[in-house]
Structures are given as structure tokens and as C-alpha cells.
Amino acid sequence: MPSDSPRFLCIASYEKGHDFLRQCAELGVLPTLLTVEKLKDAAWPREALEDLATMPAGMTREQMLHTVCWMARGRRFDRIIALDEFDLETAAQLREHMRIHGMDVSTTAFYRDKLAMRIGAREAGFLVPEFCRVLNYDELRAYMARVPAPWLLKPRAEASALGIRKINEPEQLWRALDELGDRQSYFLLEQFVPGDIFHVDSIVNEGRVVFSAVHQYGRPPMQVMHEGGVFTTRTVDRAGRDWEELTAINAALVPVLGMAQGVAHAEYIRAHADGRYYFLEVAARVGGAFIADLVATATGINLWREWAKLEVAQLHDETYTLPEVQQGYAGSVLCLATTAEPDTSAFDAPEIVFRMKKHHHAGLIVRSEDPERVRALLEGYSAVFAERFLAQMPPPEKPPA
């Protein structure tokens, strides 16, 4: 391949994005992967990479900047891509320093910082649970006097439900803040809103959502993370209210925060109290926990590959065209397993299309033209998974993948 081919620098603190890397190579882009040393021997698609570079864990942003700028002395990077949520801010800072096209630091905050995204969504007129920054104690006292408990003390920059604490009365908050010390301003306080949780996974092109798919979690991710259990999610009925309203809300909300192009994973809650939809969070990334496989099974759209096509089309000033979208329904069931390689062969429904291969995890994806069949399969399988495979562990301090 000629040396003047475009080059992408892809940063990944976790092993993911294989299809993104492969699609780049297929489109004539030379991807360099920068990952942590412990993942040097992971199953990366090395045939698609021009280079694989590693970095020690715990590098500062300045050290990352120096490393990438040193790498850039010998090759020109046309795009910098964060394959994982924890690399979004680093990639944005690198783009700004190197003056490379893409999302800047300020815009990235709306897809990474839970306080920034809530403020942005509320100012744009979207419903969000009542929240308060953890900064001024008088503000916190006034908030707790006005908003009924319980509340959630949430890290502003963690993924999934990591680090969330449920707070039932003011003294519990003050004790938690004492424990956090100087780190407390990196949290926010939010009203706990019981309800059903949904995720909407999107592709954004030229400031417009051109694809989205709506799925509903079985148990809330925070509950699964903190209490253990089986994780499920399934495509909602395309003819129902959830699909219609969440598609419309997401189409307005994701771009209004500043995304011009890329992929987004957003979460919303339909409150039990009033039936309305509240925005919870959004990230400029492909969803984890095999959600990309789930979306591909239901719709035929591979979010990793379409993201790569978007980036390459923009680089060449070409028009991106979304492939034909299938109208199927899919669901996934996943849990930590007590055995290293759990055997799921006893599950033999014809709707099973994917068996997850991950150390100490059991998981399946099913597909049907009938959303109720998917729901019934997940309900039955999740009960059997809990009995046959489920391992109970304390919530991790860092995401497992």
C-alpha cells in the first residue's frame, strides 16, 4: 500500500473495535493501534494494522501527548479515534494540540461528563432527573431540602454504573463526601427515579441521526452491577410508543449536544411515576456488553464498520450512505459465570444466532421477527442462567471490558 495512504491513530484502553480496524484497512486506511501494554498480545486484527504500539498503564495526559507527537514525527495521522469511552478526552486533547479534525475537548465533555451532558440536555429543553453539582454545600443543602430522597451520587466520568452510590438521607451524603475528599467535585447528586431503562444506539452524519435502534434492559444496569444477576436487553416493538418516542427524543438530543458525526450510545428512563421519558446519559462510542452484536443481529447494521465508513467518507469529502436496515428483533442474555468456559450447548432454540465467547462469561443472542418471542426467550433463559452459570462478585472498581 502506498505510503501516502491516509492513516488513523486508534486509541484503546480495552480490547474492542476490531471491526472498525478491519473496515479502515478495507477502505485503504492504514490504522495504528495504541493500547496498554497488558493488551499487547490480545487478539487484535493484526493483518489490518500498520502498527501496534503500547503504553504503560497510568500514563498522564501530558505523557500521552508526548508519546503520540513522537509517533507523528515519522507518519502523518489524519484522524485520531478513541475506541473506548475512557480514551475520549485524551483523543480530544490530542486533536486540539495537533490540530486534527474531530470532536474538540469542550464538545467531548457533553458525551463524557455526566454533569455537562445533563446541563446541556436540560438547557435544550429535555427532561432529566433533578440533579445538583457537588461543589457548593449550600446548593447541596437546598437541593436535598427540595428534592425527596433517595438520591444517587454518581461519578461524572465513569462508564456504565461504576461507582454509583445510593444515598437515602443527608448525613449519608456528608459521610460519603468526607471519604471522597478533594475528589468530591468529580461527582454529581441526582434524584433516583424508578423506571424502565432503555438504550438507543445511533449513527450521526452531518449533525443528523441517520440510524437508531431502541432496546430495553431487563434489570437496570446499576442493579446488575451492584447486586449481581443476569443482564438482558432486547429490541422494543417498532410499532409501540417506546420506539416512536425514544427515536424522536434521541434524534433531537444527540446532535444538539454537538456531535456532527460518529456513533452514540444513549440511555433513557421511562419513569414509573409519570410515564415520561428522562435522559440519563450519552457517550460518543459503541455500546459495550455485546450491544454492537445485538444491534447488528436486529438490524443488519454493524456500528463499528459504519463508524469507520463515516470517518473515511468525511476524510475524502464523500457522501456516506447507510446500508439497508433490517426490521428484525433481537435480545441478549449475559452473566458472569462460575466456570471459565461455560457450556451453553443445552440451549438449542432455533432463534439463537450468537454464542458469546468470553472468559468466565455465559451469553447468547437470539433473533426473531416477533418481539414477544424474543421477550419470552430472554425471560426463560435469564432464570436458567441464574441457576446454572451465575457467579456473584463485588462490583468492579474499573470496567471489565
Image (tube, rainbow, N blue to C red):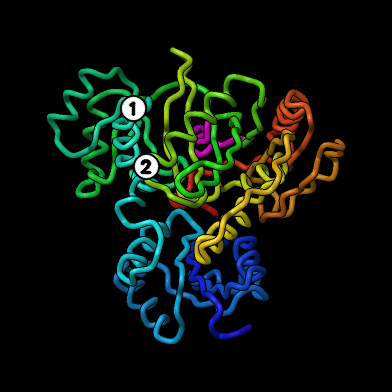
Q: Which three-letter amino acid code belongs to the residue tagged 2? A: Leu
Can residue 346 be seen from the camera position used here? yes
Please give the range of residues in magenta.
220-229
Q: Residue at x 71, y 26 (%)?
A: 375
Q: Residue at x 50, y 67 (%)?
A: 10
Q: Secondary structure at mark 1?
A: loop
- Residue beneath disc 2: 257
Farthest residue in the left direction? Answer: 138
Can residue 362 be seen from the camera position used here? no
Residue 238 x/y as whole percent: 66, 26
Residue 3 x/y as whole percent: 55, 85
Q: Nearer the viewer, residue 43 or 27?
A: 27
What main secondary structure does the magenta stretch of the protein show?
Answer: helix
The quadrant where residue 63 appears: bottom left
Whether residue 224 is in magenta: the answer is: yes
169 sits to left or right of 64 = left
Q: Which three-letter amino acid code belongs to the residue tagged 1? A: Gly
Q: Secondary structure at mark 2?
A: loop
For the C terminus, the quadrant is: bottom right
Whether residue 20 is in magenta: the answer is: no
- Residue beneath disc 1: 125
Residue 61 x/y as whole percent: 32, 67
The quadrant where residue 382 appears: top right
Q: Residues within 10 Å of mark 1 (few under 14, many from 20)?
A: few
Which label's residue is closer to the chain start, 1 or 2? 1
207 sits to left or right of 148 = right
